Amino acid sequence: MMQARMHTVIAVLACVACLAGSRRANAQDNNLAAAAEAGNLDRVRALITDKSRLDAKNADGLTPLMLAAWHGHADVARVLLDAGANANAQSPDGITALMYAALEDHPEIVRMLIASHADVNAKGKGGVTALLLAAQNGSTDSVIELLSAKADVNASGENGENALLLASQNDHPGVVALLLQAKAQLNPRAIDGDTPLIAAAQRGHVSVVRELIAAGADLNLQLADGGTAVMVAAQNGHVDVVRALIEAKADLNIRTSEGATALAMARQNAHWEIASILEGAGAKE
């Protein structure tokens, strides 16, 4: 039955992986872009004398600054910014240099771009922001820089997923803690009803589950089909998560729209240890 969807804001960056092949074929379409991507500082310095080419995009729609930021070439990024490169230029999918740097966790470049007035809350295709990308990938240092620059901690993608949900889903407890300290909404709902706690519980991320419980997450919120955190944990065989939710006093007898309970799901999926734990805690089928 129930499975909350796998939320992602990097769908627009799935093309990042496929760009690798096309980049090789197009390495000469923009000499400055190719030099920036390779981290060739001397070549970049020689080419930036032509200011008209400073923000010229390669065949993949990426500027020299985006490429330097993506690949972590801080010295190249600094030279480009000092020469007047546009810190807010966007790729065809709306991705900026700051988003690339945050995604790959290059905090020095993130800091540099912020100091050069990069928009920390710019949105790309699908509502992606630098903070959403950093949270999804567990880019802890970049999350720190973005939050310090007042990035919107509750910005969400087109399916309602915010940074806390993405970090929880992908098992980044350190990022979860940072977002909670920054007053992220604790119980945001994606369009399918998913919450950070349900997303973490479904995948067995017990450290994240405990972090969210300690912060006061609502234990009994339900997915569109009525599923709760304890149900998805029981269904997927996550013993430690079930124990943590029982200790936190989650309601074990909520039913889905089809009438199923956490105990029924544990039994249906042959998770006998969980079934025994639930029954001992007073769960009913």
Image (cartoon, grey):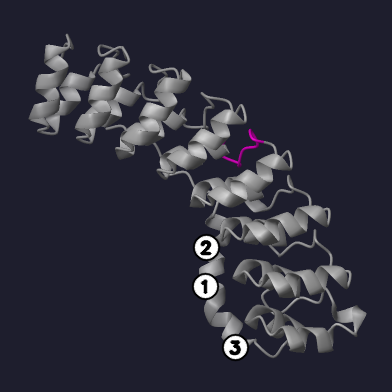
Q: Label 1, on which residue?
A: 18
Regarding residue 3, the answer to whether it shows in the image is: no
Q: Position of residue 192 (x, y in %)?
A: 47, 32
Residue 55 versus residue 230 in the image, above or below: below
At mark 1, the secondary structure is helix
Residue at 22%, 21% in the rendered image: 262
Q: Which residue is mark 2?
A: 14
Whether the residues at callouts 2 and 1 have beta carbons within 8 Å, the answer is: yes
Question: Per the image, is 191 magenta?
Answer: no
Residue pointed to by mark 3: 25
| Residue pictured at 36% horizontal, 27% vertical | 210
Span colored in magenta: 153-160
The residue tagged with tag 3: helix, strand or loop?
helix
Q: Is residue 137 left or right of residue 183?
A: left
Label located before the other in sequence (3 or 1): 1
- The 10 Å Cα crowd at callout 3, few under 14, some 14 to 19, many 20 or more, is few
